[in-house]
Amino acid sequence: MKKIVFAVTIIGLSIFLVNCHGPKQAVASTPNALTYEGDVKEVIAQNCTPCHIPANGGRVRPYDNFANVNTDIDEILRRIQLNPGDRGFMPFKHPKLPDSTIAIFVKWKEQGKLEK
């Protein structure tokens, strides 16, 4: 009897552990999951230079790295969703980003802000 209880316990525990994973693994396995390196970094390079790319002479907070963008994503989203003429609008002295570009930032945040 003890052998049966032990075997059932081991099998149950094995099934539980095989199917147990954290939320980042679930997000990472989602098809079309956006990442900073694969998606967001390129959008920033195209739309936030030269100000937020230090190598190009920027003097404000650099967004050429995951850590800063990850920390500031709420403020980035707030500012790029403002209308031109609103205080804090970004990209400064440029037209408003297309909705499809803004959606990249939104989706990246919703999916857990993956780096790679």
Image: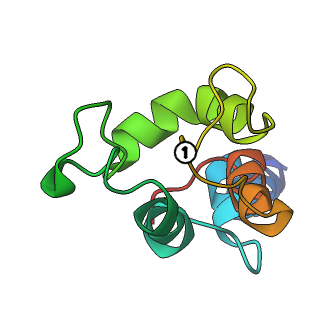
Image color mode: rainbow
Residue extending farthest top: 87
Residue at 44% across, 63% down:
41
The image shows residue 66, relative to residue 84, as above or below, that is below
Horizontal and vertical percent position of residue 11: 76, 62
Q: Amino acid at mark 1?
A: Lys
The reply, left or right, for residue 28 in relation to residue 107 is: left
Q: Nearer the viewer, residue 113 or 13?
A: 113
Horizontal and vertical percent position of residue 88: 62, 23
Task: Identify the image quadrant of residue 80.
Answer: top right
Q: Nearer the viewer, residue 13 or 106?
A: 106
- Number of labels in the image equals 1
Residue at 31% across, 54% down:
50
Q: Quadrant of the C terminus?
A: bottom left
Horizontal and vertical percent position of residue 67: 36, 39
Q: In this rendering, does residue 7 appear at all?
A: no
Horizontal and vertical percent position of residue 5: 82, 48
The reply, left or right, for residue 91 in relation to residue 26 is: left
Q: In this rendering, does residue 66 appear at all?
A: yes
Quick one: SS at disc 1?
loop
Few, some or many C-alpha atoms within 10 Å of disc 1 (few <14, some 14-19, many ≥20)? few
The image shows residue 7, relative to residue 81, as above or below, that is below
Residue at 68% across, 55% down:
95
Task: Identify the image quadrant of residue 17.
Answer: bottom right
Residue position for label 1 = 93
Residue at 76% across, 50% down:
106
Residue extending farthest bottom: 31
